[in-house]
Image (spheres, rainbow, N blue to C red):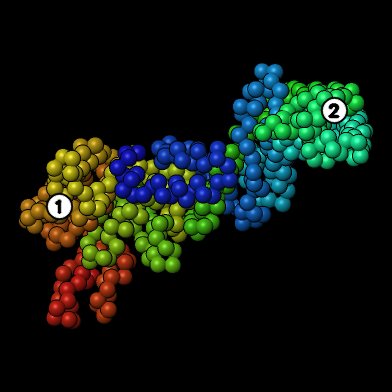
Amino acid sequence: MNKKAINVLEYNKIIAQLKEQAGSEMAKKIISELQPFHDVPTIRDMLMETTEAVTLIVHKGPLPLGGFYDIEDSLHFARKGGTLTMAQLLKIYHNLHLARQVVLFLKSDLPPLPIIQSIREVIAVHKRLEEEIDRCIISDDEMSDNASPELRSIRRAIARQNDALKARINQIVNSADNKSLLQDAIVTVRDGRYVIPVKAEHRGKFPGIIHDQSSTGSTLFIEPQVIVNLNNELRQLELREKAEIEKILGELSETVSEHYHDLLNNQKLIVDLDVIMAKGKLSVAMKAEEPAISENGELVLKEARHPLIDSEKVVPINVALGGEYNTLVITGPNTGGKTVTLKTVGLLSMMAMTGLHIPAASGSKIPVWEEIFADIGDEQSIEQSLSTFSSHMTNIVKIVENAREGSLVLVDELGAGTDPTEGAALAISILENLYKRGAKTLATTHYTELKKYAISTDGVQNASMEFNVETLSPTYRLAIGIPGKRMRSRSRRSWGFLKI
């Protein structure tokens, strides 16, 4: 799909809305790369995914896809024999837990959901590994005492040793003989060892190991000689604790590596479900419907609404193209919604080809266009020193050169910006060329000659944006088969496009 049409029709804004409905960064990345597809079976499958997601939401609510993580790097590391951190294992636990919750959620009380259920059937549940990680790890940097009997025993020994150390060092600090030697009656830790702040001038009276000193040098942090052995024993216990934690992490990492393929596949499947559910949520938010895919090139939009206009203000339109006629010429007042009509047709076509439901009534059908071309809005090429008219013509020349059967061409104010007689002749020539190439074309115009051309030419149809004569305001409704015409209104000074 050409980038110009994607930008002009604001397809990326729909993709942005779809991304907001996804729960994971992985799903958002996939969505951000979505483009309209051209393969009919693929599009039908993707539309069915969206329909199943809507059915699930309506009957039971959205899948519980709260928080899950990208664990691919951790899985590769574990498979190579690496030891995972507690933080990495916790992410794997969350993914394991989520996979099991998804399977449970989709097990019963649901209407047929063949695509979603086929995904559920291949999600692997490893409850034992999930429970092991949950039992062993409390947080990103804390392991539970229950991780192993040995770890529990070591930590009890550490607690007892700490108590013994604190009791002995408190005796030293609170001793009347030592009060004059100490800077403060407090105990601190340096390099994992209990130390006491001793006045530098009394260093010789206080046997022990100096670990640090204050910035002024007036205070030395000394480990009293009488507790050196107790500190050594504590340090040995802490090293044993660290070794036991590493052993447990290694065992958990090895178990993770044994389930490498299942866990990696689970992640892909859950991301797929996240994307599918995002499509379903967007459909519900837009009050959209699944369109049929037309195989004969006919487009029918019933009560279609532009998805980027406030749902309270947008006026639904009915549009048909590709049945009895391949070219539709739309006329009407400047504020009557002609441009919105073009954008609605183009954008809804792109949405359907992406597998998204469209904000239109049931019974709508959209062809799989080989290409969509759009020349909409004011353009001026400063770099090429082209006027608005020249810039439009440069774009239209490219469109005519590339359009063919299976193309949708959307042109706003065809031929405008030049002499009316020449502009009308040029517009008719462009429409005839596009028709001969087999393209389906929607064009807006003010030229009376184009309305006459549409009336007198097979395969070309007129349409107009309705105008309320009483209020002198547009209704924004499209009337196919009826050209717009300039005629005198009831006010001597007001002119409008009136349906005839």
Question: Residue 234: x percent and y percent?
Answer: 86, 27
Q: Mark 2 points at which residue?
A: 206
Question: Residue 272: x percent and y percent?
Answer: 57, 38
121 relative position to 482: left or right: right
* Number of numbered discs: 2
The image quadrant that residue 316 belongs to is bottom left
Residue type at the position of mark 1? Gly
Residue at point 71%, 47% (across, down)? 105
Task: Please tell me the numbered disc located at residue 241.
Answer: none
Q: Is mark 2 on a helix, strand or loop?
A: loop
Task: Please tell me the numbered disc located at residue 415.
Answer: 1
Looking at this view, name the residue that lies furthest to the top: 80
Q: Nearer the viewer, residue 50 or 194?
A: 194
Residue at point 39%, 64% (across, down)? 314
Q: Which of 312 and 424 is in front in this view?
A: 312
Q: Quadrant of the image for the C terminus?
A: bottom left
Residue at point 57%, 52% (across, down)? 54
